[in-house]
Image (tube, helix red, strand yellow):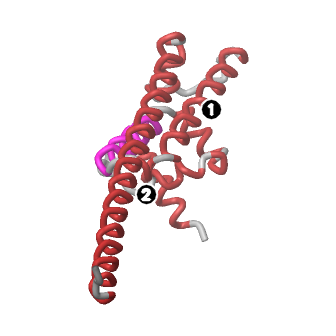
Amino acid sequence: MNVDPAILLVVATGSLVLATVVLAFATHQIASSTERATGETSNQSASDLVLQADRLLVEHPDLWPYLRRNADVGESTEKIFGDRIEAATEFYLDVLEAIWDHHSDFSVKDSKAWREWIHSALQDSLTMQKMYADESQWYPSLENVLEHCSHPKEHSWAMSIKNADQRQP
């Protein structure tokens, strides 16, 4: 049986095109699945970090006012307690930094929610505000989180830092 070479070429080309389309579709599906999984994993990791920070406050409720209620560390604070407040403050800022390091992996909705939570956490803690102001180079991701705030009146500290950064040359 003799088959016209032109027909074989058309069939081979058609098969190649079909295989390319199937491969492109499969690649798209894998990429979408991977992106979704990465976002879910990043969001879960962020939640795990917050649970660790919350555990710190549950186990040491005496730190709560300094990390979530704008209490200031006074001169009369015992050094050992002041050191514990400072360590907890650094830990909490590290958590905020780690969360925002992965914000590009979050959904738009989750990214907005985490950003606002970080703004609120910073707004509620004079100790975090002071440490961030003194050591902002330790927290480059937090600098980026200050750029877009849905509630600037509620997060005036974050907005003041943002505005100060914009005034610097």
In the figure, 129 relative to 145: above or below? above
In the drawing, does residue 71 fall left or right of residue 6?
Answer: right
Percent across and percent down for residue 105 are: 43, 49
Q: Where is residue 153 in the image (x, y as percent from the top left)?
A: 32, 48
- Labels in figure, total: 2
> Which residue is found at the position 46% from the left and 51% from the top?
145
Which residue position holds label 2?
147
Amino acid type, mark 1 = Glu
Q: Residue 138 carries which label?
A: none
Describe the element under mark 2 as helix, strand or loop. loop
Q: For numbered disc 1, what is the local secondary structure?
A: helix
**Does the magenta stretch mainly form a helix, a strand or a loop?**
helix
Circle 1 crowding by C-alpha within 10 Å: few under 14, some 14–19, many from 20: some
- Give the magenta range: 108-123
Magenta stretch holds residue 109: yes
- Which corner quadrant holds the N terminus? bottom left
Label 2 to label 1: alpha-carbon separation: 22 Å
Sequence-first disc among 2 and 1: 1
Q: Is residue 72 left or right of residue 33?
A: right
Q: Which residue is tagged 1?
A: 90
75 or 145, nearer to the observer: 145
Relative placement, left or right, of 32 versus 85 is left
Residue projecting furthest to the right:
79
Instruction: Give the residue type at disc 2.
Output: Glu
Residue found farthest to the front: 1
> Toward the viewer: 160 or 93?
93
